[in-house]
Image (tube, rainbow, N blue to C red):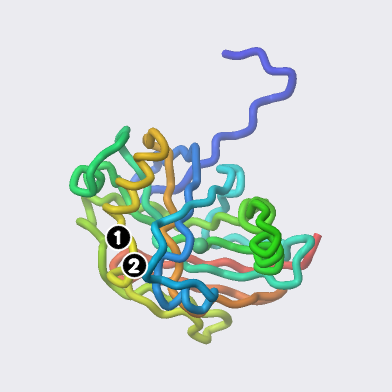
Amino acid sequence: MSNFVFPAAEIPSAAVRGTDARYAVSRIFCVGRNYADHAREMGADPTREPPFYFTKPASALTASGSTVPYPTETRNYHYEMELVLAIGAPVFKVTPEAAVAAIWGYATGLDMTRRDLQAAAKAGGKPWDTAKGFDQSAILGEIVRKSELGVLDRGAITLSVNGVEKQHGDLADMIWNQAEIVSNLSHLYHLHPGDLIYTGTPAGVGAVVTGDVMLGRIEGLGEIQLTVGPAE
Ligand code: MN
């Protein structure tokens, strides 16, 4: 046991389907603009860009089914429905073929975003941290093991707000597929169990306000739900 001046924070973790054991989370990576139709709606050219990443602190992890307060310092709080990869083996500088074996599980995810702060950061050439890595910004459903599902590389990914569908895509429409993402990221970091990767969102992102209920689904995987509460 270590001798800390303050108690160590609880280790963020996610539920795993079919077991009481939890998946301890150490890092959260996110892929930007990984569906062509979303890249276009954000004003980018989907044909020319290699994958790029941002991160959220593991402490931002929030379970599906939660109610989160409307965040501070934004007037444009957006949802982004995403497939999340859970890494289950150490990998470094691997090929796409070898990268797939390191994917241990899949989960539904919501990459919640202060879109106005992101737009200001882009315009000013500044980091995205306050736009993307704020408290309770990484929503996650239960992890389902790849050994149960097989490789989940196609199927509908949808999100509705208050029962009205807003996002509808297919996992097969990713610009960079999961093997390419894990391979590419493994050239930038030593990946290991505990690393989550949010793989980007299809078109149809938009704002939510207090009282809204988001329900996301990925075909063959499951659902995710989030309710927006009052501002703190
Ligand atoms: Mn995203």
Q: Is residue 65 visible?
A: yes
Which residue is at the front of the view, 142 or 92?
92
In the rendered structure, the answer to whether residue 230 lies left or right of residue 16 reads right
Q: Position of residue 41 (x, y in %)?
A: 51, 79
Which residue is at the front of the view, 206 or 121?
121
Indicate the quadrant where residue 226 lies.
bottom right
The correct choice, above or below, for 45 with respect to 189 in the image is below
Q: Is residue 18 visible?
A: no
Residue sitting at x 62%, y 70%: 78
Return the residue at label 2. 174
Residue sitting at x 40%, y 74%: 36
- Mark 2 and ligand 1: say if the CB distance to the nearest ligand atom is below 8 Å: no
Return the residue at label 1. 177
Of the 4 image quadrants, the one containing the C terminus is: bottom right
Which residue is at the front of the view, 186 or 208?
186
Q: Position of residue 179 (x, y in %)?
A: 27, 52
Which residue is at the front of the view, 173 or 152?
173
